[in-house]
Image (spheres, rainbow, N blue to C red):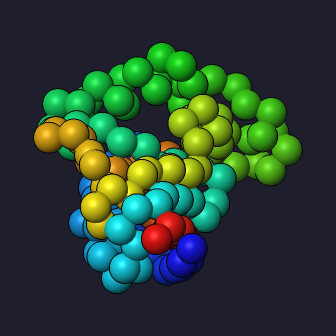
Amino acid sequence: MNAFSATFQRHTRGGNEIQDITEDLRKIVEKSGVRTGQLTAMVVGSTASLSTLEFEPGLVKHDIARALEQIAPADSPYEHENTWHDDNGHSHVRACLIGPSLALPVVDGAMPLGTWQQAVLIDFDTRPRSRQIAVTVVGE
């Protein structure tokens, strides 16, 4: 059993920005040398998430933002904002709902994503951030 760890940074604008991180993860899998196993990735912080989706303009720029606005509206009152006197309570709720991590199988030295499926970083915060993604690949 082999284990390989790496991190990478992404600079984001916040406000539901979605970035395709598939190529970053592919490079890490390749560098790990693992042929069969699992990749786990986690974004450090409580106002961003990792997921998979079809990285196309309609879904990325409109549909996800609209759905999240219905689930956790930016203009709703949040106790987090009362406690910390800030404006990102909805960012924490959205990140919690989607989650900070992603687990993908490694098969024949690659992540078996669908034709239109990409791994993505979603930043819900209300300001630009530098996001660190920690990745571990384990297997043989």
Report whether 76 appears left or right of 114: right
* Quarter of the view holding residue 16: top left
Q: Is residue 26 visible?
A: yes
80 relative to 5, above or below: above
Q: Residue furthest right?
A: 83
Residue located 85% across and 44% down the image: 83
Residue 137 position, x and y percent, is 49, 69
Q: Is residue 90 visible?
A: no
Residue located 53% across and 68% down the image: 138
92 or 34, which is in the foreground? 34
Quarter of the figure that contains the N terminus: bottom right
32 relative to 42, above or below: below
Residue located 63% across and 23% down the image: 76
What is the count of numbered marks?
Answer: 0
70 relative to 56, above or below: above
Residue 129 position, x and y percent, is 49, 67
* Quarter of the view holding residue 82: top right
20 relative to 77, above or below: below
Report whether 87 appears left or right of 17: right
Report whether 97 appears left or right of 118: right
Report whether 20 appears left or right of 10: left
Residue located 17% across and 30% down the image: 58
Residue 88 position, x and y percent, is 62, 45
Residue 95 position, x and y percent, is 58, 42
31 or 121, which is in the foreground? 31
